[in-house]
Amino acid sequence: MARILVVGGVGYIGSHVVSLLMEAGHEVTVFDNLSTGLQANLFSENRLIVGDICKEIDIFSAMEGQDAVMHFAAKKAVAESMENPAKYARNNLIGTLNLLNAMDHHGVKYIVFSSSAAVYGMPDVSVVDENTPVNPINFYGFTKAEIEKCLQWYDRLCDIKFVALRYFNAVGYDMNRRSRGHEANPQNLLPIIIEVAEGKREKLKIFGDDYPTPDGTCIRDYVHVCDLAQAHLLALDKLMNGMDSQILNLGTEKGTSVKEMVTAVEEVLGKKLNVEIAPRREGDPACLIASAEKARKILGWKPQITDLHQIVKSALPEDL
Ligand code: UD1
C-alpha cells in the first residue's frame, strides 16, 4: 500500500487509473482543478483536493506525506496548442515543473507521467519504437517532449525516478462502468463518431481520404483506456521496487483507419452514420502504430482489449 497523489485524477485516463489504484488497496488523493475533468468521475471514498499545479502553494501542500505521484493533468488539444501556446506552456510545462519541485521539496521519489505519441511528430517509419527520433510538430507534443527531458534532469539531480508512458490513441471506457471518465467537449475521433450517432453532431468529417494507406484514411493505434490504466499500476510497482527510470510506448501494435473505425461503430449500432470527406487536417501523420515491445519486456504489459467491436461497445453511452 502506498500513498499516491493522482494529479488530474478526475479526467479521462486519470479516473480509470484511480479506480485500479483503489482496487489494489492504495491510499489515493486526487488533485484536480476541475477544468476539464468531471467531479462525477470521483469515487466517494477517495479524497479530492481542488487545486491547480500552476499554483505552487496548491501543489506543494498537496505533496506532503505522499509516496508517489501519477501525473495526468495537462491540456491536450493539438489544434488549440498551436493557437494558444501560452496556455500549454503554463499548464503543461510550468505546472509540471512546479509539481517536480514540490516532489523534490517533500522527498517524493516516484512519478508516472502521461506522455504521448505526439512527441514523435511525423516519423519516417510507420511502426514507432522508443528509439524513433523525438521531433514533435505541434506545441502540445513539444510540451510532452520537454517534460520528458525535465524528468531526466530531475532524475539525475534530485534522484526522482520516473516512467514516462507515451500513449498512442487512448479510447473506450471501463467495461464494468466503475468509472466513465467522461470529458466535456471531446475532440477525438471515436467520441466524435459517437456524438454523430447520438445526433449531437450533424456529421463526421473525415480529414482526408488520399493518404498512402489502403483505404486512403489515416491509420492510428487505438489503445483501450483500461489497458493504459493497467500499465500505470505496473509502472508504479516496478518503480517502487527499484526499477530505473523508463520511457515506454503504450499501444496495441495494430493499426485502424478512420474508415475502419466508422464501420466498426456502424456495425455495432446497426445503422449508417452521416460521414463526409473533408480536407486533410494539418499535421496528421498518415500512419502511427506503436511498437510496445519495450513495455512488454519491462513491465510485462500486454493490452487485453484489442477487438475493435469490443472497444466501440465500451465507449458507447448506456442509452445508445
Ligand atoms: C493526437 C495526438 C495524440 C494525443 C491526442 C490528444 C499526434 C500525432 N497525436 O492524436 O498524441 O494524445 O491527439 O487529443 O499529435 N479524425 C477525423 N475526423 C475528426 C477527428 C479525427 O478524420 O473529426 C481523424 C484524424 O485525422 C486522425 C484520427 O482521426 O487521423 C484520430 O484523430 P484524433 O482522435 O484527433 O487523435 P490524433 O490526432 O491521432
Image (tube, rainbow, N blue to C red):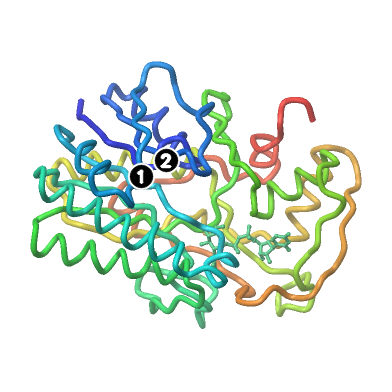
* Quarter of the rendering occupied by the C terminus: top right
Mark 1 to mark 2 CA distance (whole Å): 5 Å
Residue 149 at x, y percent in the picture: 26, 69
Locate residue 97: give its quadrant: bottom left
**156 left or right of 60 in image:** left
Task: Answer few, some or many: residues within 10 Å of disc 1's Cα (few below 14, many 20 plus, some between 14 and 19).
Answer: many
Task: Answer few, some or many: residues within 10 Å of disc 2's Cα (few below 14, many 20 plus, some between 14 and 19).
Answer: some
Q: Nearer the viewer, residue 117 or 81?
A: 81
Look at the numbered disc 1 and give the secondary structure of its residue: loop
Would you name the residue on which mark 2 appears?
33
The disc at residue 52 is 1
* Quarter of the rendering occupied by the N terminus: top left
Residue 94 at x, y percent in the picture: 31, 61
Answer with the quadrant where ligand 1 appears in the image. Answer: bottom right
Q: Nearer the viewer, residue 37 or 24?
A: 37
Residue at image position (53%, 78%) is: 122
**5 left or right of 167 in image:** left
Look at the numbered discs 1 and 2 and tell me whether their residues touch, using CB distance below 8 Å.
yes
Look at the numbered disc 2 and give the secondary structure of its residue: loop
| Residue lying farthest to the top in this orientation | 45
Q: The residue under label 2 is which amino acid type?
A: Asn
